[in-house]
C-alpha cells in the first residue's frame, strides 16, 4: 500500500473517542466511506466495516447495485486489512422510512427520504447494531463535522461546502451525534479521491451514488407508479384555464419544470411551465409560466415536527439562516418557534428575500454560521 500522510488535526477536530477504541464504519462500497475507514485505521482505531442492505423489492433489477457494492466493500476491506460484516435492515427501512415516504407523496407533499433514512436507519438501526458489536462510536463517509461545546455536541458544515451534508443530518439527536464520527469533515472531495488513488483502492474513481436513499437511481415516476395509484386530473392555470391533464398529483413537485408535458402547448406564451401548487380536494395541478412567477415566490414558511440537533431550540425572533432544499444557498431569516415542548412543536421563518419554490414535505434547516441547529418539515 502506498504511503499517504494526513494532518492529525483533521482527526482531532471531531474525535469523540480516542484510539484504540472500536469504531464501526458504515461502508457502502463508495470512495467516501472507504477513505473514512482508512483514516480511522491510520489513527489507531480498531475499525470494523458494516455494509447495510436495506432494499429487496427489485434487488435483481438494473437499478439495484447491492451485489456490486458488497463486492466493492469486501475488496476495500481486504486492502485496508479490516473485518467487514453485512447486515440486513430491509424490514426496518420499509416500516420506518419507505412507508412514510409513500404516505407523504400520497398526501401531495415531496418528502426527503435521505433525512428520514439518516435518523431512522443510518444513525438508529445501524448505531444500535454497532453498540451490540462493542463499538465506542460509529463513523460514516458524510461530509460534516462535530464539535463539543459547553456540554453539548455541535453539528457543523463540512470544510468542502460543495459536498456539505449537514442538511440531511439535522434530525439527529444529541445522543446519536455524541456517538458519531465524520472523518471526511475537514477534507475536500478531491483530496478524498487522491487518498483513495494513493493507497490503491479500486473504487477511487467510482461515481457517487444518487437517487433515493438505499434504492438508487431509477426512472422515478415509473418507480413511484409501482406503489401509488395514478389518479388523473385537470392541469390548470391560476385563473382556472385548463391547459392539460396530469397523471396524479403525487407524481409532481412544486417548482418542477421537466416532465409536465406542456412544452408544446398552443396556449403557451413561450415561457417555461412550472408546477406552482396542488389542489388535493379538487385533484387539480396548478401550473404557471415563468421561473419568477409570483406564485413560486415566498417570504414566509411554516414547518412542523421540529428537531433540534443542537440540543436546544433557538431563541424566538433571532436572525439566522436557513435552507429550504439541499444545495440552496443560506438565506437570512427570522425564527418564530411555536408550541415549544409539545409533540406538535414547529416554527415559522420570515425571510429577508423571496425564496423560490418552497415545497411542502421538504426540510427547512437552520444554521448559525457553520453550526447546524436543526429544522422541520415544511407544511
Image (cartoon, grey):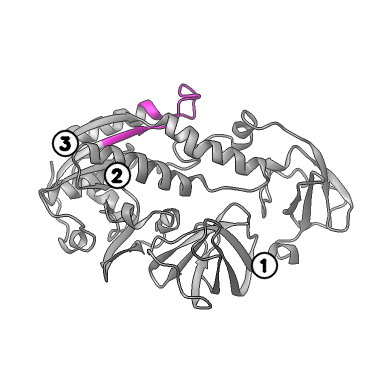
Residue 229 shown left or right of residue 184 in the figure = right
Residue 16 x %, y %: 21, 57
Question: Residue at coordinates 27% horizontally, 36% vertically from top-left?
Answer: 50
In this view, the residue farthest toward the front is 342
Q: Badge 1 is on which residue?
A: 298
Q: Where on the picture, by quarter, is residue 339?
A: bottom right
Q: Secondary structure at mark 1?
A: strand
Q: Earlier in the sequence, mark 3 or mark 2?
A: 2
Q: Badge 3 is on which residue?
A: 82
Q: In terms of depth relative to the viewer, which is nearer, 6 or 59?
A: 59
Q: Is residue 241 above or below residue 336?
A: above
Within-10-Å neighbours for mark 2: few <14, some 14–19, many 20+: many
Mark carried by residue 33: 2
Residue 312 x %, y %: 40, 67
Mark carried by residue 248: none
Residue 294 x %, y %: 74, 67
Given contact means CB atoms under 8 Å apart, are the residues at marks 3 and 2 in contact? Answer: no
Residue 258 shown left or right of residue 122 in the figure = right
Bounds of the magenta span?
50-67
Distance between the alpha carbons at the discs numbered 1 and 2: 38 Å
Quadrant containing the N terminus in the rendered view: top left
Amino acid at each position: 500500500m502506498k504511503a499517504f500522510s494526513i494532518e492529525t488535526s483533521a482527526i482531532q477536530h471531531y474525535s469523540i473517542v480516542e484510539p484504540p477504541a472500536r469504531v464501526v464504519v458504515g461502508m457502502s462500497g463508495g470512495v467516501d466511506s472507504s477513505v473514512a475507514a482508512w483514516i480511522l485505521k491510520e489513527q489507531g482505531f480498531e475499525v470494523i466495516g458494516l455494509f447495510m442492505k436495506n432494499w429487496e423489492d427489485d434487488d435483481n433489477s438494473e437499478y439495484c447495485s447491492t451485489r456490486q457494492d458488497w463486492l466493492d466493500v469486501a475488496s476495500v476491506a481486504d486492502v485496508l486489512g479490516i473485518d467487514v460484516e453485512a447486515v440486513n435492515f430491509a424490514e426496518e427501512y420499509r416500516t420506518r422510512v419507505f412507508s412514510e415516504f409513500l404516505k407523504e407523496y400520497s398526501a401531495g407533499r415531496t418528502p426527503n427520504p435521505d433525512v428520514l433514512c439518516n435518523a431512522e436507519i443510518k444513525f438508529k438501526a445501524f448505531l444500535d447494531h454497532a453498540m451490540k458489536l462493542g463499538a465506542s462510536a460509529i463513523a460514516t463517509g458524510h461530509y460534516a463535522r462535530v464539535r463539543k461545546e459547553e456540554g453539548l455536541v455541535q453539528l457543523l458544515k463540512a470544510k468542502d461546502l460543495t459536498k456539505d451534508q449537514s442538511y440531511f443530518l439535522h434530525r439527529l439527536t444529541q445522543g446519536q451525534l455524541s456517538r458519531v464520527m465524520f472523518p471526511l469533515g475537514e477534507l475536500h472531495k478531491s483530496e478524498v479521491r487522491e487518498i483513495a488513488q494513493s493507497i490503491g483502492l479500486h473504487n477511487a474513481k467510482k461515481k457517487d451514488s444518487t437517487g433515493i436513499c438505499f434504492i438508487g437511481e431509477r426512472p422515478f415516476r415509473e418507480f413511484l407508479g409501482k406503489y401509488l395509484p395514478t389518479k388523473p386530473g385537470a392541469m390548470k392555470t391560476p385563473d382556472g384555464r385548463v391547459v392539460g391533464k396530469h397523471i396524479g398529483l403525487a407524481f409532481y413537485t412544486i417548482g418542477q419544470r421537466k416532465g409536465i408535458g406542456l412544452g408544446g402547448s398552443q396556449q403557451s406564451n413561450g415561457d417555461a411551465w412550472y408546477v406552482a401548487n396542488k389542489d388535493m380536494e379538487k385533484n387539480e395541478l396548478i401550473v404557471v409560466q415563468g421561473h419568477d412567477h409570483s406564485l413560486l415566490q415566498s417570504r414566509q414558511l411554516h414547518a412542523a415536527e421540529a428537531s433540534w440537533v443542537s440540543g436546544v431550540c433557538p431563541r424566538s425572533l433571532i436572525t439566522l439562516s436557513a435552507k429550504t432544499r439541499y444545495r440552496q444557498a443560506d438565506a437570512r431569516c427570522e425564527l418564530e418557534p411555536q408550541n415549544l415542548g409539545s409533540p406538535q412543536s414547529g416554527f415559522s421563518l420570515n425571510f429577508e428575500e423571496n425564496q423560490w419554490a418552497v415545497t411542502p414535505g421538504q426540510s427547512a434547516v437552520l444554521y448559525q454560521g457553520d453550526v447546524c441547529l436543526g429544522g422541520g418539515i415544511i407544511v
